[in-house]
């Protein structure tokens, strides 16, 4: 019998079972004092037009809905960064804004909403990933002031093409980035997961393989919604490789 | 403490009756339930009654947390707690008996080495060689209750809390924790790591000790908070206090511990397998 139904009864003596249920349910549990920072770094270049961007938008909406009520929602924050249409952009909900702004794109997973992303433009992947690293560091500084700690930040990179500069020329400027990411991962400052979207070419695949040697997969081997499963496991243990781990639901 | 003195502290007619009431529970994290995976936490405890009434009975408690990324971590945590119990029990029976906290600490230091060596030997044999040992990666926290001494050794990020007197936050003491902060929170030392210098060993003598609580890191986020100085301490209203008070009661149904671990706010705060093992001194 729930406590509110019992309390009115004159002379009611709760059983020991009911007393312990009340005691357990009455324990005060503090809200999580740590955050999991997750950056979604998503390609919205013109090559994503059609089925790819449509699937990505569907998956983002479905994913946002799943995350809003997920048990991880209280401790997880998402930042969406896109590269392609409009250049490199930060997002909060359905609003995009200048990447040079000091405003953080991180929002609680409880409040995370997905915009409808257009596909256009070139593929400034390197600039977007660097922005992702910067927003993580900025958010960590804010959390330090708020006396909230964090677990190792995670970045998910989703792309179908080779990195370009702002003019659309293929560029090797991602190569130093691979070394920087390795260094961050060794210092436990980041774990990067890279998802290649077909028809990503061999050079594009090799780029992602070098950016995320242990955490690179091709879309089609799994659905975008499977990222949620991988995310849960990567939050539990960022050292878990998605190339070798048994990650798929049985 | 001399053995005769220990015997004198035991209520008459209660030789063989455990001095401590010990209860524990463990719960798979959400991801493990969803994927049908084993719980990678494990706990165990044992009671060493002695026929000789001059010996205070002893309880050995252990919790372990297998590394999520390792293929046999669930085996590792179970192997760790069972190894700890058998090695420590044998050691205590063979070396009986330390009389002071420093002597207990010295004995536990010695036994912790044996526990790690035995664990690695078994993992090597079961796994099929040196290369497989890392697959059994796990933490281990072991507590020995030999009232009024509480001793422990720990590898990794488990934690131990002791209650003195009738409890309340001011009478709860975080005696051991290595829960790391920030990015380091996801990494720790395992029995399969280089454990040289990484084993924390201590023993405390206090007549006022009335409870001991040990847990893997899963519950750290519901129990511990980091201050401005970076030091960990108990949260303002520690749930451990209520757990002790419930265990003090003869009629407490220990299923309540599972109810606690299944609470939505506990699951939201932990995102991991959770384990608690608590002991209260019987009146």
Image: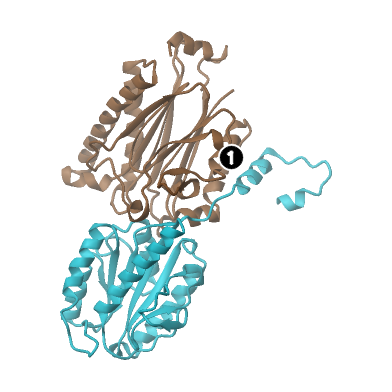
Q: What x and y, as percent, mark residue A42?
A: 33, 79
**Number of residue marks:** 1
Residue B49 falls left or right of residue A18 = left
Q: What x and y, as percent, mark residue A158?
A: 30, 77
Q: What x and y, as percent, mark residue B104?
A: 36, 22
Residue lying at the far right of the rendered structure: A10
Which residue is pictured at 54% across the width and 56% down the height?
Answer: B264
List the residue tagged with mark 1: B242
Q: Chain of mark 1?
A: B
Residue B27 visible somewhere in the drawing: no
Question: Which quadrant, please, contains the C terminus of chain A?
Answer: bottom left
Residue A56, located in which quarter of the rendered image?
A: bottom left
Q: Which chain is brown?
A: B
Secondary structure, mark 1, is helix
Q: What x and y, as percent, mark residue B182?
A: 36, 55
In front of the other: B85 or A78: A78
Residue B154 falls left or right of residue B18 = left
- Tell me: residue A70, above or below residue B203: below
Residue A84, located in which quarter of the rendered image?
A: bottom left
Residue A31 falls left or right of residue B251 = left
Q: Which chain is cyan?
A: A
- Tell me: residue B201, above or below residue B40: above
Which residue is pictured at 52% across the width and 45% down the height?
Answer: B235
């Amino acid at each position: 019998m729930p406590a509110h139904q019992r309390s009115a009864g004159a002379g009611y003596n709760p059983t020991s079972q009911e007393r312990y249920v009340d005691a357990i349910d009455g324990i005060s549990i503090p809200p999580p004092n740590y955050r999991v920072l997750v950056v979604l770094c998503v390609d919205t270049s013109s090559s994503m037009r059609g089925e790819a961007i449509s699937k990505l938008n569907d998956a983002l909406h479905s994913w946002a809905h799943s995350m809003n009520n997920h048990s991880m929602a209280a401790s997880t924050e998402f930042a969406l960064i896109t590269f392609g249409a409009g250049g490199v952009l930060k997002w909060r909900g359905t609003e995009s804004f200048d990447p040079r702004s000091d405003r953080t794109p991180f929002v609680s997973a409880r409040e995370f909403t997905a915009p409808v992303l257009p596909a256009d433009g070139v593929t400034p992947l390197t600039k977007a990933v660097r922005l992702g690293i910067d927003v993580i560091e900025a958010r960590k500084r804010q959390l330090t002031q708020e006396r909230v700690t964090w677990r190792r930040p995670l970045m998910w990179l989703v792309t179908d093409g080779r990195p370009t500069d702002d003019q659309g020329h293929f560029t090797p400027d991602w190569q130093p980035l691979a070394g920087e990411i390795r260094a961050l991962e060794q210092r436990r400052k980041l774990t990067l997961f890279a998802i290649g979207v077909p028809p990503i070419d061999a050079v594009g695949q090799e780029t992602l393989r070098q950016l995320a040697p242990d955490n690179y997969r091709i879309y089609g081997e799994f659905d975008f919604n499977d990222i949620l499963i991988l995310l849960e496991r990567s939050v539990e243990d960022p050292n878990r490789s998605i190339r070798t781990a048994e990650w798929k639901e049985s | 403490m001399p053995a005769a003195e220990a015997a004198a502290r035991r209520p008459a007619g209660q030789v063989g009756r455990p001095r401590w009431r010990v209860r524990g529970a463990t719960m798979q994290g959400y991801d493990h339930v969803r994927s049908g995976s084993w719980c990678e936490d494990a706990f165990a405890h044992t009671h060493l009654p002695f026929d000789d009434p001059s010996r205070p009975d002893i309880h050995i408690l252990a919790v372990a947390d297998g590394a999520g990324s390792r293929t046999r971590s669930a085996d590792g945590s179970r192997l760790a707690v069972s190894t700890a119990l058998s090695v420590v029990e044998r050691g205590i029976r063979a070396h009986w008996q330390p009389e002071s906290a420093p002597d207990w600490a010295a004995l536990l230091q010695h036994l912790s080495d044996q526990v790690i060596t035995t664990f690695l030997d078994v993992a090597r044999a079961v796994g099929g060689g040196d290369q497989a040992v890392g697959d059994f990666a796990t933490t281990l926290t072991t507590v020995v209750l030999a009232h009024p001494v509480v001793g422990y050794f720990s590898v990794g990020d488990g934690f131990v809390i002791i209650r003195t007197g009738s409890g309340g936050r001011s009478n709860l003491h975080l005696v051991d924790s290595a829960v790391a902060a920030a990015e380091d929170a996801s990494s720790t030392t395992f029995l399969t790591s280089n454990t040289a210098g990484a084993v924390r060993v201590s023993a405390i003598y206090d007549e006022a000790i009335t409870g001991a609580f040990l847990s893997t890191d899963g519950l750290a986020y519901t129990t511990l908070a980091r201050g401005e100085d970076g030091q960990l301490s108990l949260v303002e209203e520690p749930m451990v206090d209520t757990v002790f008070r419930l265990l003090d009661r003869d009629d407490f149904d220990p299923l309540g511990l599972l109810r606690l671990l299944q609470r939505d706010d506990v699951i939201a705060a932990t995102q991991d397998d959770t384990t608690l093992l608590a002991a209260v001194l019987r009146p």
